[in-house]
Image (cartoon, rainbow, N blue to C red):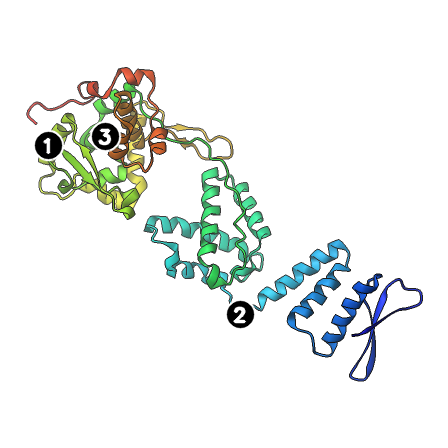
Amino acid sequence: MGSIIKQPGSPYYYARFTDNGKEKWISTKKTARKEAQVIADAYENAARGKASVDDQFNVLLKLLATLPKNDQDVKRGEYSARLMRHRTIALPIIKAWLAWLDSPLKGNPASKTIAGYSAVWKRFAGWITKRKVEHLHEVTTIHAQDYAADIWRSHVAPATYNAHVKFLRAMFNTLKAKAGLIVNPWTDMKSLDKETEGRQNFTPKELTAICSKAKGTTRYMIALGLYTGMRLGDVVSLRWIDIGKNKIEIIPLKTRRKGKKIAMPIHPALRVLLNELKKQVGDSEYLFPTEREAYLKDTASITKRFQQFLNDCGITTQEKGNGHRRRAIVRKGFHSLRHSFVSLCAANRVPQVAIQELVGHGSPAMTALYSHADFEQKQNAINGLPNMAFTIKKNS
């Protein structure tokens, strides 16, 4: 046990011991004898090589505790950074994306989803490397908070902000072992409440206008969207083999990873229109081969074409950006046909479970979100729609 002694003029005890024949005096910065003795023993053991790593670390902690509060925080940060830089497990920022792609822990996201994740990662990687951070484990909670603030300052919508935070949190979790992460800096980041930006369903007057004015393939695509609630991607990808005598069976693109097939009964008016279309396209595998090819090259191309059609019909499709958004919000589009289908089914008292199965919703809560028929729509239920909407060829 090392000896402790007070020096004249100092309130602190000093540790006194010999090391390689030399006498050493080190202040313990403690006025209490017991506390000073613990520190003195640690100093002596460290000097003589008897201290373990834990002993050395405890000495460091005790020394840090003697510093002013602000200096303590600075030193803790410096020591933490120095320790982290010399870790045996480290993943450079420049290699993190490929490491995530190669990891089976990420699941099996669709290629389109991966493209979106890639854009999120590129933005973050560019931002963090400008701050001289080289490895994933060096990203701190402060970095995460600062980056979140940077995203928000760019005036993105809450949904976009949430998408960034959610993916980065998931990516760090996926790479936790490979990058040697002790904590995930994104764990405590909160999501923002989303603005209400959903599509609106068409009014009966609007449905009459778009169905009566639609020409060419647009006419048949509208009929499919209205009578089945199918999404645009599923409509343009529809094959004749998917169409049976009384029903249409597909695996929706949005949920294709689940492999769940949904069956939709064919409305009499839709059957007439499908027969009409079949005569036009002949032996083509797809109902809309031209639109499908355009959709595969640029998914927005068909959407924009339909938006222009709605505008030509005198239907306002966008609202000015509100809140934190800069871009206009699309309120009415092809997806509005899906909303209209669900709403009209609800107005005709179709059981919710049946609607859920028809449109492929995963939960009644999602179906309830779509079902928002007003009183006028309840009076103009789906049974009256074919006569007032589509002009059917008599010889079809």
Q: Earlier in the sequence, mark 1 or mark 3?
A: 3
The furthest residue to the right:
8
Horizontal and vertical percent position of residue 313: 29, 23
Q: CA distance from mark 2 to mark 1?
A: 68 Å
The N terminus sits in image quarter: bottom right
Up/down of 348 relative to 300, above or below: above
- Classify 10 Å Cα crowding around label 3: few (below 14), some (14-19), many (20 and above): many
Q: How many marks?
A: 3
Q: Is residue 343 left or right of residue 321?
A: left
Could you tell me which secondary element the residue under label 1 belongs to? helix
Residue at image point 74% right, 54% down: 70
Could you tell me which secondary element the residue under label 2 belongs to? loop
Asked whether residue 72 appears in the rendered view, the answer is yes
Residue at image point 29% right, 34% down: 305
Residue 88 image label: 2
The C terminus sits in image quarter: top left
Residue 188 versus residue 36: which sits nearer the camera?
36
Type of amino acid under label 3: Ile
Up/down of 314 relative to 50, above or below: above
Horizontal and vertical percent position of residue 285: 14, 44
Q: CA distance from mark 3 to mark 2?
A: 60 Å
Residue 285 image label: none
Contact between marks 1 and 3 (CB within 8 A): the answer is no
Residue at image point 80% right, 68% down: 37
Residue 49 versus residue 37: which sits nearer the camera?
37
Asked whether residue 157 appears in the rendered view, the answer is no
- Classify 10 Å Cα crowding around label 1: few (below 14), some (14-19), many (20 and above): few
Circle 1 sits on which residue?
275
Type of amino acid under label 2: Thr
Circle 3 sits on which residue?
222
Q: Is residue 364 left or right of residue 260?
A: right
